[in-house]
Image (cartoon, coloured by chain):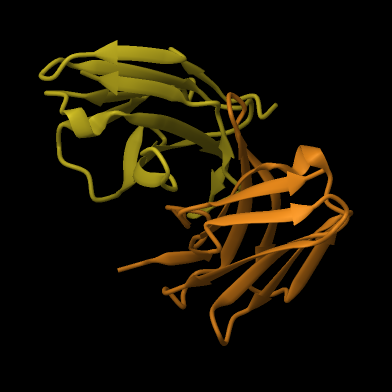
Chain colours: A orange, B yellow
Amino acid sequence: GENVEQHPSTLSVQEGDSAVIKCTYSDSASNYFPWYKQELGKGSQLIIDIRSNVGEKKDQRIAVTLNKTAKHFSLHITETQPEDSAVYFCAASKNDDKIIFGKGTRLHILP
Amino acid sequence: ETGVTQSPTHLIKTRGQQVTLRCSSQSGHNTVSWYQQALGQGPQFIFQYYREEENGRGNFPPRFSGLQFPNYSSELNVNALELDDSALYLCASSFRRAGVGDTQYFGPGTRLTVL
């Protein structure tokens, strides 16, 4: 069935360094790839998304890349700050219907 | 803030009981999707409602049911609660047109504990 694998499950980086989270998906028909940030008590916030007709998208310190051939997509956060500490989920869907989520990456920004 | 609200915030029930969770969608949205997030896991799709009808369902038993109202708000009902139903329940609203949905925006969730 449809599946999204996410790595690593936990990631610690020094403040100011970059963080990279990688995901793979199984359904080649997937065409929409959102990333959500989840903080305790704040729900899941959409931080960036990419559609299958684009290979890369950037929004300030956050960028996402997509390789449709390999069915890989990645989140890159540069110049990390303490407020970037959270759980990040990658996801995949077809036409924005049912979203299949990865298991999440807990990102710790170390002072 | 996404404009999606859920109630209640927290809920404690016992096995065998029934529960109703509520979701108000963002203004202008016509579709609500429900997800279950167990501790340490990613959200799992339960079902989606569009124009007051179920529009897709995940791998959940029939005791999970839902409703969507004319104002596009939605309810998730779970009958005969089991311990494994303890989770964070998330709803997401979006706008669907011509058979294609748009970005889903999540509410803060309802934390359900089944004892």
Residue A3: name its quadrant. Answer: bottom left
Residue B86: name its quadrant. Answer: top left
The residue under the point 15% across, 15% down is B17
Q: Where B10 falls versus A2 (above or below)?
A: above
Left or right side of A56 for B115: left
Say which quadrant the N terminus of chain B sits in: top right
Q: Where A103 falls versus B13 (above or below)?
A: below
Q: Residue B28: x percent and y percent?
A: 63, 30
Residue situated in front as seen by the camera: A103 or B21: A103
Residue extending farthest front = A111
Q: Residue A29: x percent and y percent?
A: 46, 74
Residue B97, visible in the rendered structure: yes
The residue under the point 59% across, 81% down is A68
Left or right side of B111 for A22: right
The residue under the point 24% across, 50% down is B59
Say which quadrant the C terminus of chain B sits in: top left
Q: Where B45 falls versus B36 (above or below)?
A: below
Q: Residue A15: x percent and y percent?
A: 84, 50
Residue B74, visible in the rendered structure: no
Left or right side of A52 for A17: right
Residue extending farthest bottom = A69
Left or right side of A42 for A83: right
Residue situated in front as seen by the camera: B27 or A98: A98
The residue under the point 56% across, 40% down is B94
Residue situated in front as seen by the camera: A8 or A61: A8
Q: Residue A98: x percent and y percent?
A: 42, 52
Give the total of numbered labels. 0
